Image (spheres, rainbow, N blue to C red):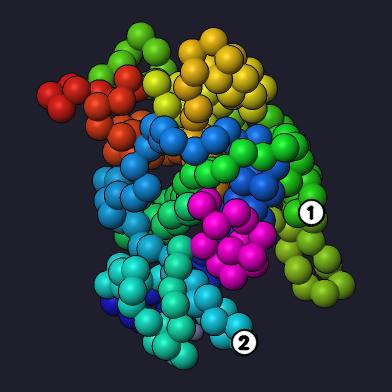
Amino acid sequence: MRGEARKTAAAAAAMLAMAALCAVACALFGGSDTADEAGVVMALPETVPPWRGTTFWFCQAEGCGRAFLDNSFDFGTPCPACGGELRQMNLPERRLLPADTEIVRRYYDTPQRFLPLNVSIVLSGADRSSIHRPEVCQTAAGHEIVRRRRIGVPLSWRPERPLEVTVLEMTRHGNAEAGVPPQHTFYAYWFVGANGRETASHWKRFWWMGTDRVFRGVSHRWAYVAVVGPRTPGDDNYLGLLSAFVSQLHRKILRPGTEAAPAADAP
Ligand SMILES: [Zn+2]
């Protein structure tokens, strides 16, 4: 188990760095509203068949900061290296984010390794004063967005309304002299609020944030769901796999009983 975790840790490292940066930027500048209602559960599933997820843990101790991929850990498990506290947000994120921000994060893979995925949910807490789109933090992290598209992910229990997901195709240019190859990735995201609110649009979320507060008296604790993985330039085949993953993940993270969530006996 630990040996496997070390291997997947290396494979996941690059994607994690990107996802972590965006988690910080989006939670800091995401314009989340006062925290009382959340539309998601803050727990990523262990399996999204055929993918299996492994949880990321980060040591919070100064001078250690090690990362672990391990499902046998839980909150309260000490860092195996130094005995420090482990969380699913890393130390820089914890320093930058308001204390009531929550992050869960898992790395998903299959035995065939056909599409490894790095998944995170950031749940915002208290009010933010400025707004930043996910696109902005990606480019700030050195990724060029080469294509931006919106896909509809079919949901078996809600065929009339697919889940809309924004997909950014990105390239981080390498450095031939230093032997660093270019990195081609995709970054897929959507937002979940309370009362069935769900959108792939930053601007629509912003609109709902304001109008729901003024006209409905509802304050959302918006969640930001991101799925990151590798892609091959010019090849769209990853979209089918991404769609298969998201169609399952979506219902597993919706809080039961909320307006967006499926009934227990839904297909
Ligand atoms: Zn440690």
Question: Is 91 inside the magenta-drawn segment?
Answer: yes
- Answer yes or no: disc 1 within 8 Å of ligand 1: no
Is 203 or 267 nearer to us in this picture?
203
* Tag 2 residue: 63
- Answer yes or no: disc 2 within 8 Å of ligand 1: no
In the displayed image of the protein, which residue is found farthest to the left?
265
| Residue 163 showing in the rendered view | no
* Tag 1 residue: 142
Is 9 or 73 nearer to us in this picture?
73
**In this rendering, is residue 123 above or below 240?**
below
Which residue shows up at 75% across the image and 54% down it?
Answer: 141
The label shown at residue 130 is: none
Highlighted range, magenta = 89-101
Label 2 sits on what residue type? Gly
Quadrant in the picture for the C terminus = top left
Tell me the quarter of the picture where residue 177 sits. bottom right
Locate residue 13, reporting x and y percent: 56, 67
Earlier in the chain: of badge 1 and badge 2, it is 2
Is 140 or 259 nearer to us in this picture?
259
**In this rendering, is residue 120 above or below 61?**
above
Quadrant in the picture for the N terminus = bottom left
Tell me the quarter of the picture where residue 176 sits. bottom right
Secondary element type, mark 1: loop
Q: Of tags 1 and 2, which is closer to the observer?
A: 2
Locate residue 164, reporting x and y percent: 50, 22
Label 1 sits on what residue type? Gly
Secondary element type, mark 2: loop
